[in-house]
């Protein structure tokens, strides 16, 4: 069993989900603040 | 306490949140990336677990933020019930989604870690089951907060639920003490650790890095919610 595959999966999932959450929150914030002007 | 009340003013909050958002995100990215790099390349493998121990550097921060997020919801909910600050209600709602995502990531990374270490993806032990319950409690909070907002509620019901949900936090914390099952016992405390410092140090970088990212995400979500509420209030005034 190659342990690095599990390590890569865990890091990929966590970093990917965090980046997606940041991106989504940023777009939602910019859209809402633009619409509020 | 006076400074907290001052922050509850939306205009004052926005003046502070605008420069803090990119500062938190940038600090978070730098600390997280450095911590991940160090955890993957600068520490020795564990003598029993081998390289899979490196999952520690992301699993612990996700657990910390999954539980810390709910503590934030509870504090904001209590502030809302006591002082009726609208920003406290917005803060609780803004924390819910990132809290749920990090609780899920804690379960997922723990499961991925469990397969090579324990030989199983999942076990119904005290720690895993109570963390799964917290994830469901987050989902229920988001549904309740959305339903309350849709029916024009005053936010009291989600706030009471937010405080009641804190009962899970000590259960998760002490589950490894109360039930001696598969999950390892407490290995990292505030003042001491059973993990050797040569393996532990990158954790402080990922822990603080993900915390800054979490704070940046919450600020962005609060700004979005505040802008939406202001726009809706303005449209209601125009329609009246």
Image (cartoon, coloured by chain):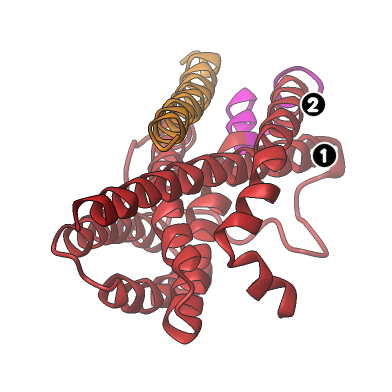
Chain colours: A orange, B red
Task: Tell me where residue A34 sits by quadrant.
Answer: top left
The residue where tag 1 is placed is: B201
Residue at left offset 39%, top offset 37%:
B111
The residue where tag 2 is placed is: B43
Q: Chain of mark 1?
A: B
**Quarter of the picture holding the C terminus of chain B:** bottom left
Nearer to us of marks 2 and 1 is 1
- Is residue B187 covered in magenta? no
Q: From this view, report whether residue B44 is shown above or below residue B139.
A: above
Q: Is the residue under label 1 in contact with that under label 2 (CB below 8 Å)?
A: yes
Q: Nearer the viewer, residue B24 or B207?
A: B24
Locate residue B165 relative to residue B169 in the image: left or right: left
Q: What x and y, as percent, mark residue B19?
A: 72, 38
Residue at left offset 46%, top offset 16%:
A1
Precedes in sequence: disc 2 or disc 1: 2
Locate residue B61 relative to residue B16 in the image: left or right: left
Highlighted range, magenta = B39-57
């Amino acid at each position: 069993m190659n342990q690095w595959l599990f390590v890569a999966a865990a890091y990929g999932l966590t970093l990917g989900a965090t980046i997606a959450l940041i991106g989504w929150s940023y777009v939602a914030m910019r859209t809402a603040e633009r619409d509020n002007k | 306490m006076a400074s907290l009340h001052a922050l509850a003013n939306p205009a004052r909050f926005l003046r502070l949140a605008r420069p803090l958002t990119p500062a938190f995100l940038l600090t978070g990215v730098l600390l997280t990336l450095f911590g991940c790099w160090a955890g993957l390349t600068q520490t020795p493998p564990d003598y029993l677990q081998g390289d899979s121990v490196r999952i520690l550097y992301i699993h612990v921060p996700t657990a910390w933020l999954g539980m810390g997020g709910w503590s934030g919801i509870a504090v904001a909910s209590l502030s809302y019930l006591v002082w009726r600050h609208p920003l406290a209600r917005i803060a609780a709602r803004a924390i819910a989604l990132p809290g749920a995502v990090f609780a899920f990531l804690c379960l997922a990374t723990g499961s991925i870690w469990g397969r090579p270490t324990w030989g199983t993806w999942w076990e119904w032990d005290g720690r895993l089951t109570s963390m799964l319950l917290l994830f469901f409690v987050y989902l229920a909070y988001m549904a309740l907060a959305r339903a309350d907002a849709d029916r024009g509620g005053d936010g009291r019901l989600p706030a009471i639920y937010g405080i009641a949900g804190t009962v899970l936090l000590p259960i998760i914390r002490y589950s490894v003490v109360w039930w001696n099952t598969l999950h390892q016992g407490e290995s990292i405390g505030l003042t001491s650790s059973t993990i050797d410092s040569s393996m532990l140090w990158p954790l402080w970088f990922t822990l603080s890095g993900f915390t800054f990212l979490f704070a940046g995400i919450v600020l962005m979500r609060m700004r979005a919610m505040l802008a939406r509420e202001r726009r809706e209030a303005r449209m209601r005034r125009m329609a009246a």
